[in-house]
Image (spheres, rainbow, N blue to C red):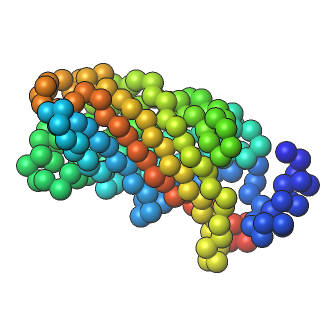
Amino acid sequence: MKPILLAVIAVTLCIPVVAQSSAWQLDPLHSSAQFAVRHMGISTVRGTFTKLNGTARYDAADPKNNSVEVTIDTASVDTRVEMRDNDLRSDHFFDAQKFPTMTFRSTKIESAGTNKVKITGDLTIRGIAKPVTLDVDGPSKPVNDGQGHLHMGVSATGTVNRTDFGMTGYQGMVGNEVILTIDAELVQPTTTAAK
């Protein structure tokens, strides 16, 4: 899309113009990483990781120029049951003492329709990297918070097999398929704030 047309659209919508390729920071206070896994095949246990950070490069004109990197603190796992959380931190699952973080780094981003993209990247858990594809809604239109920053949101979902990352315990009790969801708010200083 030509810069003049971008400017016209931005003025029409009363939103600031975002540079065609710009860097954004994940806002950890307004972002979350969740997971869901079946228990004994009869119920779903849901949990979240309370500590995460990340960066993204966003090119509104060409998704191929976009990139994403997210780091999650494995010890921050929270399923609302202390005994289960401690087990998840142990070497039965995340082995948080030996592997304090898990990461996702994009390798390919492509359009998947209006306001949707597919992000393929390497998910590393317990030192094992496997390719994962996430279905993403967004990004939303940038919003100015009135304090010199732009914000936009995305929601990404994907499915992984925990045994691919060496988590093979509790077969028959804990499901192997894990659904991941990341709801992220991204922040960028406006041109005015940067001066």
Residue projecting furthest to the right: 4
Label count reads 0
- Left or right of residue 67: residue 61: right
Quadrant position of the C terminus in the picture? bottom right
- Left or right of residue 127: residue 64: right
Vertical placement of 89 versus 11: above or below? above
Q: Residue at x 64, y 77 (%)?
A: 146
Any part of residue 23 in sight: yes
Q: What percent of the width, then of the height, locates residue 165?
A: 29, 25
Residue projecting furthest to the front: 42
Q: Residue at x 91, y 55 (%)?
A: 4
Quadrant position of the N terminus in the picture? top right
Vertical placement of 126 versus 23: above or below? above
- Left or right of residue 190: residue 40: left
Q: Residue at x 57, y 34 (%)?
A: 118
Q: Quadrant of residue 123?
A: top left
Q: Nearer the viewer, residue 85 or 175?
A: 175
Q: What percent of the width, then of the height, locates residue 100?
A: 27, 42
Vertical placement of 133 versus 17: above or below? above
Q: What percent of the width, then of the height, locates residue 190?
A: 69, 66
- Left or right of residue 161: residue 106: right
Q: Nearer the viewer, residue 35 or 25?
A: 35
Q: Quadrant of residue 125?
A: top left
Q: Residue at x 13, y 53 (%)?
A: 81
Any part of residue 100 in sight: no
Q: Nearer the viewer, residue 49 or 129?
A: 49
Q: Nearer the viewer, residue 111 or 104?
A: 111
Q: What percent of the width, then of the height, locates residue 40?
A: 14, 33
Residue projecting furthest to the bottom: 146
